[in-house]
Each structure stands twice: as C-alpha cells, then as structure tokens.
Image (cartoon, grey):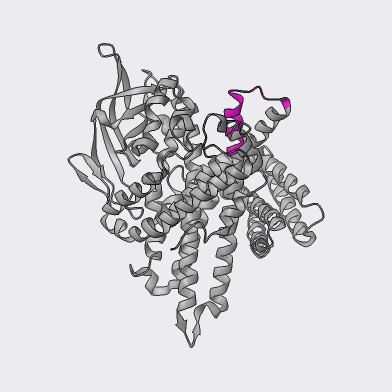
Amino acid sequence: MENFYLDTPELKFQLEHPLMDKITRLKENNFQYHLSFDYAPVDKDDALDNYDKVLEIVGEICANVIAPNAAEVDKEGAHLEEGHVRYARGTDQNYKALFDAGLIGMSLPREYEGLNFPIVPYVMAAEIVSRADASFANIWGLQDCAETIREFADEEQKQRYLPRFSREGATAAMVLTEPDAGSDLQAVQVKAHFDEASGVWKLNGVKRFITNGDADIALVLVRTEANTTDARGLSLFIYDKSSNAVTVRHLEHKLGIKGSPTTELVFKDAPAELLGQRKYGLIKYVMALMNSARLGIGAQSVGIADAAYREAVKYAKEREQFGHRIIEFPAVYEILRNIKARLDGIRALLYETTRYVDITKVYDEYSQNHTLEKEERNEMKFYSRYANVFTPLIKLFGSEYSNSIAYDSLQIHGGTGFTKDFPIERIYRDARITSIYEGTSQLQVIAAIKGVTTGIFQSRIQEFDEMLENDYSELRVKLQKLTSELNEAFTFIDEHKNTELLDFHSRRLVEMAGNIIISYILLLDSKRDKTYEDSARIFINLSLSENAAKYHYIMNFDNDLLITYKNIVI
C-alpha cells in the first residue's frame, strides 16, 4: 500500500532535527507525564517514535482514502440543505477515517483527550493531508481553533469544549471576515449584546467568506463595545452549533478547494460565550489564531507543491515526443530540478519556522508550572522574536512557490494539463487560494518587512553564517555577497527617510532576505544530509539572479517614478 509519509524521507529528516530534543523535553514536562499517563513517552526517542508511528498512519490514510477521493470531492463539492452545509460524500469518508484513527485533537493536552503532540508533527500531518487533498486540509486543519480555546479560555470552557474534538470528532471554524471587512478586521460590525434576562451573550449580523462556517464549534470575532470603530471594541466568542441560531445563507462557487465549504452566515440572537477578556478579541486572540492559521497555510502550500512536483515528474517520465521521454530534454529537466530546489526550500523554511513557534509555545506551557531560569527566559524570547517574522515569511514564500510550482507542472503536462484527465488541473486551481486567504501576500510583506527594518532577519542570517564555520566556502561567499547587497539596498532606501518609498520596495527587500534565509537553511541541512547539496546549490544560484535584479532595481530607482505609479489611468 502507498504511504504519503514513508515516501517522503524529507519529513523524517525534519522530525529528527536536533531542536526536537528540546521541544519534546519541554512538551513532556521533562518526561514526567508518563507518571500520570501510561501511554506518555519516557524519553525523546520514545516521543519521536510515537510521532513517527502516528505520521505513518496519517500517510497511509492520505494515500489510500483521501487522495483517491479528491477528484470526486472536487466534482461534487459541498452543498446546502435547509440552511446547513452537507459535505461531499468523500469528505465524510475522509473525516471518519482520521477520526477513527484518533487524529482529531492531535496537539491538545492529554487531560483533554488529545495526543499532546508538538506543532512540528502536527504541521507534518497537515502537509501530508494537503498533498492528498488541499480542500480537505481546510476542514481537518481547523482544529487549530482548539489550540486557541486551550490557550485563552477558562478551565470550565476547556473541559466542555476540548474533549469534543477527539471524543466526537468536532469540527471548527474561524468566523472573522464580513462583506465589508475582509482583510481589515478592525472594521468588523457583527454585534454582541449581553441579554440580562438570560445571562447570555447574543450575536447578530452577517459573516462572509467563512471556511467551514457550519462547523460544530466556531470562534467568532464581534463588536461588543458601543460607539467604537477599531480593534479596541472587538471581542472573541465561542459559538456552539447545537444552539441552531446561525443559518448558512450562501455557499461561494469557487475556482478551487471545492470540497471546502466557504459560507455566508447569518447570526440571529445566536447565544455565545465570551472567550478571554472583552476588547482583546483582535489584538490578542485573533492575532494568535491567525499566526497559527498562516503556519497551516504554509503546510498546505508545501503539500500542494509536493503533489504538483510528483505529477510533473510522473508525466515527464511517461510522455514521449520526438522519440524521447520529455524528461530528457533540457527545457523540461531544468524546470523539474528548479521545482525540486524550491520545494526543498519552502519545506526547510516551513519546519525552521515551526520549530521557532514550537519552542516559544512549549516554553510558555512549561512556565505555567515551573519558574524559568534566566537562560530559559532569554531563549524563549530569542525564538519568539524569530517566530513573529518567520511566520509571515513562510506564508508568503510557501504560497507563492505553491502557485509557481503548480504552474510549471501544468506547463510540463502541456495541453493535457488543461483538461480534467490529470490531477494537475485540480492541483493548479487549489494552489491559487493559498496566496490570498489568511492574509494576502501583500499583507504578509507588511508583517515580514519588520524582519528587515529591525534587523531580525539580518541577525539570523549572521547566525546561520557562523554555523557553517569553514564549510561550503564557495557557496558561503555567494551568500555573503547576497547579504551585503540586501544590507546595501535597505540602507539606500532607509537613508531617504521616506515611508512610502520603503513600502514600495518592501516586497523586494523581503524576497531578497527570504532567498538568503532559505539558502542558508538548505546549506545547513546539507551538513546533516548530503542529499540536500544539489538543491542548496541550485537554490543559491537562482537567488543570485533574482536578488541581483531586485538590487539593481532598487539602487537605480528614480524616486520621481513613485508619482508616475500613483497616477494610474483608469
């Protein structure tokens, strides 16, 4: 039988990263949890073996249930029945398979009937599921919402809601956007009022573009404070579908991810529970939720890119033209090798970022029962600092590369790729949304540019360089040159003291930094496994040409052109 985990050794390589020692130790409270839970690991090797075995189960289900269902799910899609969503038949089969295997609530603590997995193996599972069917990943992956409940809800709410994920297979939804409040969540207008008679909060209004909006448990961003128009008037609520006070008015007819229902919801005096404190809905809770979601889209992007790459290789090996398999032509094998380098690159960036997030979160959990030493506090701050800027970076690079890799794969298929005879047609459509939802690429740049302007990216690049010591002298010199160009370009812009000019060039700066960061991570990975050397070399050479173009554009830019760009003729 096929297995989407076992046929991807890159995942096992990331699972065995040296930082997993620290992550597992903190996650398992120095491996003391086995005294209370007999199935908890007793040491790092035991923990990694648990993750490995569970991921093997995920890989088997994805290869033999979810992937075979993907085409029919795409064709059938979700539909409406009496104001509620009905999944495609294959979607129900997929969810049941993962639920029966105990894979809902993977990252929740054991006291809430979860597996207590760190984020790294959970993100790996998300990547594998996305490779099988990107649309289904949006349904299974929204169990991220359970983490927000675990992190910010009171204990009574945790006890009521969290066990439902693993016990009942509860589904979840992030209910944030509205018809007039897309990316600008500060403009949310759905209102909550406290009903004194019943002692319950009631929600009223319309939400739109809600992924899996008819879920069992929803986190809803609403306005609780009268006479407010910004984030300070917003709070986050838990809505339980069993109250039957929300109607699905419309399902979007989408280009891709058709198995994932995107809904318009009407709230009519819907009872809900305040999560955490009033006024912190957007500035604290939703920001944490969105960061988690962006990491999930990074995983989804890598899974889609992997699926596209495999389809391209398979077709190129089988298709013959002019008496030769097309994989033998330079025009084709160049595309395939560049795809592989970029796929390795975004996967490396994904798990580097995930480890930063993981260490930050496990230290936060650990500190709830232990007093952190000064060195531990500093280490927590160290990784938190990088997690904040690397998360939008992986969302940006992962989604953009997912799109370009799907594009190149379809190109290799030629005219047949434009038909429904091959999976790449669906994969290509599914890829497109990744650079749009959970914050467009333009918004990721706004978040990631702080990594350049504060020097955080440059600091990490310097640390990566020092880790190489005396190895890879030729490639290291190339990366040092790229780093100098990045610093020079940023200094050139910064000296103008023109915010609009910085905004205009932000994407170029972020992409220059991202290319350097991915290059260094691939080089460091190749020190542990020589199979990454080819991808590192190719990615660095691609970065040299791409960064050179961006550097030249910035350094030779006529600032008066800003006015020309602003004078758009409609």
Q: Is residue 245 rendered to the left or right of residue 486?
A: left
Q: Judge whether residue 185 is colored magenta.
A: no
Where is residue 299 shown, x and y percent of the image?
Answer: 50, 49
Query: Above or below — where is 512 with respect to 318?
Result: above
Badge count: 0
Residue ID at (71%, 55%): 482
Q: Main secondary structure of the magenta part?
A: helix
Residue 504 in view in this figure: no
Residue sitting farthest toward the bottom: 323
Where is residue 360 shown, x and y percent of the image?
Answer: 60, 34
Of 336 and 503, the residue lying toward us: 336
**Quadrant containing the N terminus in the rendered view:** bottom left
Residue 364 in view in this figure: yes
Residue ID at (37%, 24%): 223
Residue ID at (37%, 50%): 136
Segment tinted magenta in the rendering:
358-374
Where is residue 253 shown, x and y percent of the image?
Answer: 28, 51
Where is residue 561 shown, x and y percent of the image?
Answer: 57, 50
Query: Above or below — where is 184 with respect to 466?
Result: above
